[in-house]
Image (spheres, grey):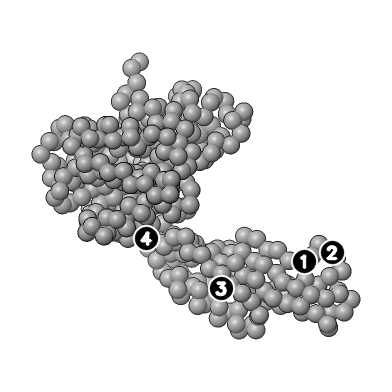
Amino acid sequence: MTPSRTLALTEKLIALSSVTPDDKGCQQHLIDLLAPLGFACEVIESNGVTNLWARKGTTAPLLVFAGHTDVVPTGPVEQWRSEPFNPTHRDGKLYGRGAADMKTSIAAMVVACEEFTAAHPDHAGSIGFLITSDEEGPATDGTVIVCNLLKERGEQIDYCIVGEPTSDETLGDMIKNGRRGSLSGRLTVLGVQGHIAYPQLARNPIHLAAPALAELVAEQWDAGNEYYLPTSWQMSNINGGTGANNVIPGEMVIDFNFRFSTASTHEGLKKRVHAILDKHGLHYELKWALSGLPFLTPRGNLSEALSAAILTETGVTTELSTTGGTSDGRFIAQICPQVIEFGPPNASIHKIDEHIELRFVDPLKNIYRRTLENLLR
């Protein structure tokens, strides 16, 4: 059988070994396809990261497709049943690094625009693409750079669909209308080192910190809301001691992380942690790192248009969800009031033998096209 346009483009992109932050020419291939459709394409480079901003039209509303061409490393190549960057069909699936996260989504978005603009050359509004090669890496020179530039220019995005793999058991059963924020801390509790036989001459930071840590574990940070589970605080690492069993350590280091909802703010969470530590009289140092703010898109035009497209194409009634890790949606939400993530099932992402079921490839494209029709026709 002749592969579909979407499948052929997906395979072309998978064959380009674009391990973050190297784009490997993926975005130039997209430019070659988008420019003939009337998109003005701009390459924005930052510290070795390649970003693409493409726009067709000048009027509102502006619907943007967003995604990333970079992929995570393959892991041990010998553990793959086929070469990671050689797209391979097996058992009704397309295998290759990036098949699910997220080169199929990008291909589907491009082909959806080809079909939509051919059928509706005088469509309302504008269409954009925001593509980066720095989503799987530090994410400091990718989407955030483009968003800041658009903000400086005063370019308003009205709707954004991020092609992250959000589906659970079947295509379209889940879309993300928000993501939790991520706030990390490194807490160093200071004591006094000494011989374990003379505890009166030392101050054990492990013992001193234990009551405060127990309180932090038991604390209810918020109750969540309609869209979010309650904010979670988790310790990921505890390090203390010299390695000897007869020495009281002089310090203990604890790494922790908040995954927080829109029911809390990072400033408020910081204050509450400091208040608990201070209440217990600890001598400590605490360094914070905010890697992402929470964002939320309540039910509205975009979620309704996308949900209707999913139902029409697949017969599936989708679920709105805010679960999972952070994504570039957190940056786009700062300049766009409605951001939704939607893509193929995510069970194989970042794994050996990453894949997508072939039966989902064209329906994914059709859903993107139907969403365009629902909003811009």
Q: Residues within 10 Å of mark 3 (few under 14, many from 20)?
A: some
- Badge 3 or badge 2: first in the primary sequence: 3
Q: Residue at x 20, y 50 (%)?
A: 62
Disc 4 versus disc 2: nearer the observer: 2
Q: Which residue is mark 3?
A: 219
Quadrant location of the C terminus in the rendered image: top left
Asked if residue 104 can be seen in this view, the reply is no
C-alpha span from label 4 to label 2: 46 Å
Disc 3 versus disc 1: nearer the observer: 1
What's the residue type where badge 2 is placed?
A: Ala
Q: Which residue is mark 2?
A: 244
Disc 4 versus disc 3: nearer the observer: 4
Asked if residue 55 can be seen in this view, the reply is yes
Q: Position of residue 194 (x, y in %)?
A: 83, 76
Q: Which mark is residue 278?
A: none
Q: Is residue 346 above or below residue 78?
A: below
C-alpha span from label 3 to label 1: 27 Å
Q: Position of residue 191 (x, y in %)?
A: 73, 77
